[in-house]
Image: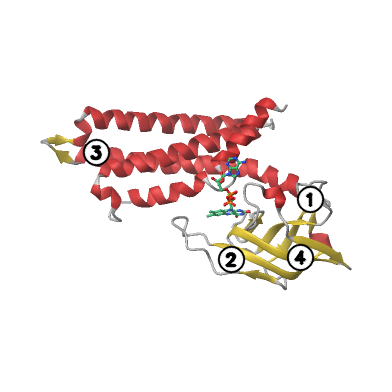
Amino acid sequence: MLAGDLLGAYCLSEAGSGSDAAALVTRATLDGTDYVVDGAKAWVTHGGHADFYNLMVRTGSPGADGAGPHGISCLLAASDTPGLLPQPPEKKMGMRSAHTATIVLDGARVPADRLIAGEGEGFRIAMSALDGGRLGIAAVAVGLAQAALDLAVSYATERRQFGSTIASFQGMEFLLADLATQVEAARALYLSAARLHDAGKPYGPQASMAKLFATDTCMRVTTDAIQVLGGAGYVEDYPAERYFREAKVMQIFEGTNQVQRIVIGRSLTRS
Ligand SMILES: Cc1cc2nc3c(=O)[nH]c(=O)nc-3n(C[C@H](O)[C@H](O)[C@H](O)COP(=O)(O)OP(=O)(O)OC[C@H]3O[C@@H](n4cnc5c(N)ncnc54)[C@H](O)[C@@H]3O)c2cc1C
Protein backbone atom coordinates (compact mmCIF):
# COMPACT_ATOMS: atom_id res chain seq x y z
CA MET A 1 0.00 0.00 0.00
CA LEU A 2 2.77 2.44 0.93
CA ALA A 3 4.33 1.91 -2.49
CA GLY A 4 1.01 2.84 -4.07
CA ASP A 5 0.63 -0.60 -5.64
CA LEU A 6 -2.28 -1.82 -3.55
CA LEU A 7 -5.60 -0.12 -2.89
CA GLY A 8 -7.56 -0.76 0.31
CA ALA A 9 -11.19 -0.13 1.23
CA TYR A 10 -12.77 0.59 4.58
CA CYS A 11 -16.18 -1.04 4.99
CA LEU A 12 -18.08 0.16 8.04
CA SER A 13 -21.33 1.73 6.78
CA GLU A 14 -24.40 -0.25 5.80
CA ALA A 15 -27.76 0.79 4.35
CA GLY A 16 -29.32 0.76 7.81
CA SER A 17 -26.32 1.96 9.83
CA GLY A 18 -24.57 5.21 8.92
CA SER A 19 -24.14 7.64 11.80
CA ASP A 20 -25.13 4.81 14.14
CA ALA A 21 -22.34 2.64 12.76
CA ALA A 22 -22.45 0.21 15.68
CA ALA A 23 -25.89 -0.94 14.55
CA LEU A 24 -24.34 -2.88 11.65
CA VAL A 25 -25.83 -6.30 10.90
CA THR A 26 -23.45 -7.98 8.43
CA ARG A 27 -22.65 -11.29 10.09
CA ALA A 28 -19.55 -13.51 10.02
CA THR A 29 -19.82 -17.08 11.30
CA LEU A 30 -16.80 -19.31 11.88
CA ASP A 31 -16.98 -22.47 9.75
CA GLY A 32 -13.84 -24.60 10.02
CA THR A 33 -10.88 -22.41 9.07
CA ASP A 34 -13.00 -19.69 7.44
CA TYR A 35 -15.46 -17.01 8.43
CA VAL A 36 -18.57 -17.07 6.25
CA VAL A 37 -19.82 -13.51 5.76
CA ASP A 38 -23.36 -12.49 4.79
CA GLY A 39 -24.69 -8.95 4.40
CA ALA A 40 -23.85 -5.79 2.45
CA LYS A 41 -21.50 -2.89 3.15
CA ALA A 42 -22.65 0.45 1.71
CA TRP A 43 -20.81 3.48 0.36
CA VAL A 44 -17.46 1.72 0.04
CA THR A 45 -14.83 4.11 -1.37
CA HIS A 46 -12.74 2.18 -3.94
CA GLY A 47 -15.51 -0.45 -4.02
CA GLY A 48 -14.89 -2.66 -7.05
CA HIS A 49 -11.28 -1.40 -7.46
CA ALA A 50 -9.70 -2.19 -4.10
CA ASP A 51 -7.23 -5.05 -3.67
CA PHE A 52 -8.53 -5.76 -0.18
CA TYR A 53 -11.46 -4.80 2.01
CA ASN A 54 -11.47 -4.15 5.77
CA LEU A 55 -14.87 -5.59 6.65
CA MET A 56 -16.47 -4.57 9.95
CA VAL A 57 -18.77 -7.51 10.72
CA ARG A 58 -20.66 -8.97 13.64
CA THR A 59 -19.06 -12.18 14.92
CA GLY A 60 -20.46 -12.26 18.42
CA SER A 61 -23.59 -11.49 20.32
CA PRO A 62 -24.48 -7.83 20.40
CA GLY A 63 -24.93 -6.07 23.73
CA ALA A 64 -28.09 -6.34 25.78
CA ASP A 65 -29.68 -3.65 23.59
CA GLY A 66 -29.40 -5.95 20.56
CA ALA A 67 -26.85 -3.72 18.77
CA GLY A 68 -23.87 -1.66 19.78
CA PRO A 69 -20.14 -2.16 19.41
CA HIS A 70 -19.95 -5.52 21.23
CA GLY A 71 -19.21 -8.46 18.98
CA ILE A 72 -18.00 -6.39 16.03
CA SER A 73 -14.81 -7.71 14.42
CA CYS A 74 -12.56 -6.65 11.56
CA LEU A 75 -11.75 -9.06 8.71
CA LEU A 76 -9.28 -8.39 5.90
CA ALA A 77 -10.83 -9.81 2.72
CA ALA A 78 -9.00 -10.02 -0.60
CA SER A 79 -10.88 -8.71 -3.65
CA ASP A 80 -11.01 -12.21 -5.18
CA THR A 81 -12.81 -13.67 -2.15
CA PRO A 82 -15.62 -15.88 -3.49
CA GLY A 83 -18.98 -14.28 -2.64
CA LEU A 84 -17.55 -10.74 -2.32
CA LEU A 85 -19.60 -8.95 -4.97
CA PRO A 86 -19.04 -5.24 -5.79
CA GLN A 87 -22.17 -3.54 -7.12
CA PRO A 88 -22.29 -0.84 -9.83
CA PRO A 89 -20.74 2.47 -8.68
CA GLU A 90 -22.95 5.23 -7.25
CA LYS A 91 -23.58 8.28 -9.46
CA LYS A 92 -22.23 11.12 -7.31
CA MET A 93 -22.30 14.95 -7.39
CA GLY A 94 -18.54 15.02 -6.75
CA MET A 95 -15.56 12.81 -5.92
CA ARG A 96 -16.01 11.17 -9.28
CA SER A 97 -12.39 10.09 -9.63
CA ALA A 98 -12.94 7.48 -6.90
CA HIS A 99 -15.64 4.85 -7.18
CA THR A 100 -18.11 4.39 -4.34
CA ALA A 101 -20.08 1.15 -4.33
CA THR A 102 -22.02 -1.30 -2.21
CA ILE A 103 -20.24 -4.59 -1.57
CA VAL A 104 -22.60 -7.53 -1.25
CA LEU A 105 -21.29 -10.42 0.82
CA ASP A 106 -23.07 -13.60 -0.15
CA GLY A 107 -21.56 -16.45 1.81
CA ALA A 108 -18.13 -14.87 1.29
CA ARG A 109 -15.43 -17.11 2.79
CA VAL A 110 -12.61 -15.20 4.51
CA PRO A 111 -9.78 -17.25 6.07
CA ALA A 112 -9.97 -17.06 9.88
CA ASP A 113 -6.32 -15.93 10.07
CA ARG A 114 -7.46 -12.72 8.32
CA LEU A 115 -9.11 -11.59 11.57
CA ILE A 116 -7.42 -8.32 12.62
CA ALA A 117 -6.60 -8.26 16.36
CA GLY A 118 -9.23 -10.41 18.09
CA GLU A 119 -12.96 -10.99 17.91
CA GLY A 120 -14.83 -8.00 19.32
CA GLU A 121 -11.98 -5.58 18.50
CA GLY A 122 -13.51 -4.35 15.23
CA PHE A 123 -15.34 -1.28 16.44
CA ARG A 124 -12.30 0.04 18.32
CA ILE A 125 -10.21 -0.45 15.15
CA ALA A 126 -12.86 1.25 13.02
CA MET A 127 -13.07 4.27 15.32
CA SER A 128 -9.30 4.71 15.62
CA ALA A 129 -9.03 4.79 11.82
CA LEU A 130 -11.64 7.56 11.77
CA ASP A 131 -9.58 9.86 14.01
CA GLY A 132 -6.71 9.84 11.51
CA GLY A 133 -9.11 10.05 8.59
CA ARG A 134 -10.74 13.16 10.03
CA LEU A 135 -7.38 14.92 10.12
CA GLY A 136 -6.86 14.00 6.46
CA ILE A 137 -10.32 15.29 5.49
CA ALA A 138 -9.63 18.56 7.35
CA ALA A 139 -6.39 19.01 5.40
CA VAL A 140 -8.08 18.29 2.08
CA ALA A 141 -10.86 20.75 2.95
CA VAL A 142 -8.32 23.48 3.67
CA GLY A 143 -6.58 22.83 0.35
CA LEU A 144 -9.86 22.95 -1.55
CA ALA A 145 -10.97 26.13 0.27
CA GLN A 146 -7.62 27.76 -0.53
CA ALA A 147 -8.01 26.89 -4.22
CA ALA A 148 -11.49 28.42 -4.28
CA LEU A 149 -10.24 31.53 -2.49
CA ASP A 150 -7.32 31.92 -4.91
CA LEU A 151 -9.71 31.66 -7.85
CA ALA A 152 -12.09 34.21 -6.31
CA VAL A 153 -9.28 36.71 -5.63
CA SER A 154 -7.82 36.29 -9.09
CA TYR A 155 -11.22 36.77 -10.78
CA ALA A 156 -12.17 39.72 -8.57
CA THR A 157 -8.97 41.59 -9.41
CA GLU A 158 -9.55 41.17 -13.16
CA ARG A 159 -13.31 41.44 -13.63
CA ARG A 160 -14.48 45.03 -14.18
CA GLN A 161 -17.95 46.47 -13.53
CA PHE A 162 -19.05 50.08 -13.01
CA GLY A 163 -15.65 51.14 -14.37
CA SER A 164 -13.56 49.38 -11.69
CA THR A 165 -12.41 45.90 -10.76
CA ILE A 166 -15.02 44.23 -8.58
CA ALA A 167 -12.26 43.69 -5.98
CA SER A 168 -12.16 47.45 -5.47
CA PHE A 169 -15.69 47.47 -4.04
CA GLN A 170 -15.64 47.28 -0.26
CA GLY A 171 -18.52 44.78 -0.21
CA MET A 172 -16.35 42.42 -2.23
CA GLU A 173 -13.12 43.10 -0.35
CA PHE A 174 -14.76 42.42 3.01
CA LEU A 175 -16.17 39.15 1.69
CA LEU A 176 -12.72 38.03 0.50
CA ALA A 177 -11.18 39.10 3.81
CA ASP A 178 -13.68 36.98 5.76
CA LEU A 179 -13.02 33.96 3.53
CA ALA A 180 -9.25 34.29 3.89
CA THR A 181 -9.58 34.54 7.67
CA GLN A 182 -11.68 31.39 7.83
CA VAL A 183 -9.21 29.44 5.66
CA GLU A 184 -6.28 30.53 7.81
CA ALA A 185 -8.13 29.57 11.02
CA ALA A 186 -9.05 26.16 9.59
CA ARG A 187 -5.42 25.54 8.60
CA ALA A 188 -4.17 26.45 12.06
CA LEU A 189 -6.76 24.17 13.70
CA TYR A 190 -5.91 21.04 11.72
CA LEU A 191 -2.17 21.62 12.10
CA SER A 192 -2.64 21.95 15.85
CA ALA A 193 -4.51 18.60 15.96
CA ALA A 194 -1.86 17.00 13.72
CA ARG A 195 0.89 18.12 16.12
CA LEU A 196 -0.90 16.34 18.98
CA HIS A 197 -1.05 13.20 16.82
CA ASP A 198 2.66 13.46 15.96
CA ALA A 199 3.51 13.86 19.65
CA GLY A 200 1.64 10.63 20.45
CA LYS A 201 -0.96 12.49 22.53
CA PRO A 202 -4.76 11.96 22.47
CA TYR A 203 -6.21 13.99 19.60
CA GLY A 204 -9.67 12.53 18.85
CA PRO A 205 -11.81 15.54 19.85
CA GLN A 206 -9.31 17.93 18.23
CA ALA A 207 -9.49 15.91 14.99
CA SER A 208 -13.29 16.22 15.12
CA MET A 209 -13.03 19.99 15.71
CA ALA A 210 -10.65 20.33 12.77
CA LYS A 211 -12.88 18.22 10.48
CA LEU A 212 -16.01 20.14 11.52
CA PHE A 213 -14.52 23.61 11.17
CA ALA A 214 -12.44 22.98 8.03
CA THR A 215 -15.24 21.30 6.07
CA ASP A 216 -17.86 23.89 7.07
CA THR A 217 -15.34 26.57 6.07
CA CYS A 218 -14.70 24.79 2.78
CA MET A 219 -18.44 24.68 2.02
CA ARG A 220 -18.77 28.37 2.77
CA VAL A 221 -15.71 29.43 0.77
CA THR A 222 -16.61 27.33 -2.27
CA THR A 223 -20.20 28.66 -2.16
CA ASP A 224 -19.05 32.29 -1.91
CA ALA A 225 -16.43 31.75 -4.62
CA ILE A 226 -19.27 31.05 -7.05
CA GLN A 227 -20.91 34.30 -5.91
CA VAL A 228 -17.70 36.23 -6.60
CA LEU A 229 -17.58 34.86 -10.14
CA GLY A 230 -21.28 35.57 -10.71
CA GLY A 231 -22.65 33.67 -13.73
CA ALA A 232 -19.14 32.51 -14.61
CA GLY A 233 -19.06 30.66 -11.31
CA TYR A 234 -22.14 28.65 -12.21
CA VAL A 235 -20.84 27.14 -15.44
CA GLU A 236 -18.07 24.66 -16.13
CA ASP A 237 -15.72 27.18 -17.82
CA TYR A 238 -14.19 27.88 -14.40
CA PRO A 239 -13.49 25.29 -11.65
CA ALA A 240 -15.68 27.11 -9.06
CA GLU A 241 -18.73 24.89 -9.61
CA ARG A 242 -16.59 21.76 -9.29
CA TYR A 243 -14.98 22.99 -6.07
CA PHE A 244 -18.49 23.51 -4.68
CA ARG A 245 -19.55 19.99 -5.66
CA GLU A 246 -16.40 18.46 -4.18
CA ALA A 247 -16.81 20.30 -0.87
CA LYS A 248 -20.20 18.89 0.10
CA VAL A 249 -19.25 15.27 0.76
CA MET A 250 -16.66 16.31 3.32
CA GLN A 251 -19.44 17.49 5.64
CA ILE A 252 -20.96 13.99 5.33
CA PHE A 253 -18.34 11.26 5.33
CA GLU A 254 -15.86 10.19 8.01
CA GLY A 255 -18.79 10.99 10.34
CA THR A 256 -21.22 13.79 9.48
CA ASN A 257 -20.60 17.19 11.03
CA GLN A 258 -23.49 16.52 13.41
CA VAL A 259 -21.61 13.41 14.55
CA GLN A 260 -18.44 15.51 15.04
CA ARG A 261 -20.42 17.73 17.39
CA ILE A 262 -21.55 14.64 19.31
CA VAL A 263 -17.90 13.49 19.65
CA ILE A 264 -16.75 16.94 20.79
CA GLY A 265 -19.68 17.36 23.17
CA ARG A 266 -19.09 13.96 24.79
CA SER A 267 -15.41 14.73 25.28
CA LEU A 268 -16.46 17.78 27.30
CA THR A 269 -19.22 16.23 29.36
CA ARG A 270 -18.35 12.54 29.77
CA SER A 271 -14.72 12.31 30.84
C1 LIG B 1 -18.93 9.57 -1.32
C2 LIG B 1 -19.03 8.79 -0.04
C3 LIG B 1 -18.00 7.92 0.31
C4 LIG B 1 -18.10 7.16 1.47
N1 LIG B 1 -17.10 6.28 1.77
C5 LIG B 1 -17.27 5.42 2.81
C6 LIG B 1 -16.31 4.37 3.05
O1 LIG B 1 -15.31 4.23 2.35
N2 LIG B 1 -16.55 3.50 4.06
C7 LIG B 1 -17.65 3.61 4.88
O2 LIG B 1 -17.78 2.79 5.78
N3 LIG B 1 -18.56 4.60 4.68
C8 LIG B 1 -18.40 5.50 3.68
N4 LIG B 1 -19.32 6.50 3.45
C9 LIG B 1 -20.52 6.55 4.30
C10 LIG B 1 -20.55 7.75 5.24
O3 LIG B 1 -19.63 7.57 6.28
C11 LIG B 1 -22.01 7.91 5.71
O4 LIG B 1 -22.76 8.41 4.61
C12 LIG B 1 -22.11 8.83 6.89
O5 LIG B 1 -21.55 8.26 8.05
C13 LIG B 1 -23.58 9.19 7.21
O6 LIG B 1 -24.39 8.05 7.26
P1 LIG B 1 -25.77 8.04 6.43
O7 LIG B 1 -25.48 8.46 5.03
O8 LIG B 1 -26.41 6.72 6.66
O9 LIG B 1 -26.64 9.18 7.07
P2 LIG B 1 -27.53 9.06 8.38
O10 LIG B 1 -26.76 8.48 9.50
O11 LIG B 1 -28.83 8.42 8.03
O12 LIG B 1 -27.78 10.60 8.72
C14 LIG B 1 -28.73 11.41 8.02
C15 LIG B 1 -28.72 12.79 8.69
O13 LIG B 1 -29.11 12.65 10.09
C16 LIG B 1 -28.12 13.24 10.90
N5 LIG B 1 -28.03 12.52 12.18
C17 LIG B 1 -27.94 11.17 12.36
N6 LIG B 1 -27.85 10.89 13.67
C18 LIG B 1 -27.89 12.09 14.33
C19 LIG B 1 -27.83 12.48 15.71
N7 LIG B 1 -27.68 11.58 16.70
N8 LIG B 1 -27.93 13.79 16.03
C20 LIG B 1 -28.06 14.72 15.04
N9 LIG B 1 -28.10 14.42 13.71
C21 LIG B 1 -28.01 13.13 13.37
C22 LIG B 1 -26.83 13.12 10.11
O14 LIG B 1 -25.84 14.04 10.56
C23 LIG B 1 -27.33 13.42 8.70
O15 LIG B 1 -27.44 14.82 8.54
C24 LIG B 1 -19.23 7.30 2.32
C25 LIG B 1 -20.25 8.19 1.97
C26 LIG B 1 -20.16 8.93 0.81
C27 LIG B 1 -21.29 9.87 0.45
**Residue at the spot of label 1:** 66
The dot on residue 37 is 4
Tell me if mark 2 has few (under 14), some (14-19) or many (20+) residues whose alpha carbon lies within 10 angstroms of its own: some
Classify mark 2: helix, strand or loop.
loop
Left/right placement of residue 123 relative to residue 183 reads right
Q: Nearer the viewer, mark 1 or mark 3?
A: 1
Query: What residue do we see at 31% from left, 31% from top?
Result: 175
The single residue placed furthest to the bottom in the displayed view is 82
Q: Amino acid at mark 4?
A: Val
Query: What residue do we see at 65% from left, 35% from top?
Result: 204
Tell which circle, 1 or 2, labels the residue nearer the N-terminal end. Answer: 2
The dot on residue 49 is 2
Query: What residue do we see at 25% from left, 32% from top?
Result: 172
Q: Amino acid at mark 1?
A: Gly
CB at disc 1 and ligand 1 closer than 8 Å: no
Q: Amino acid at mark 3?
A: Ala
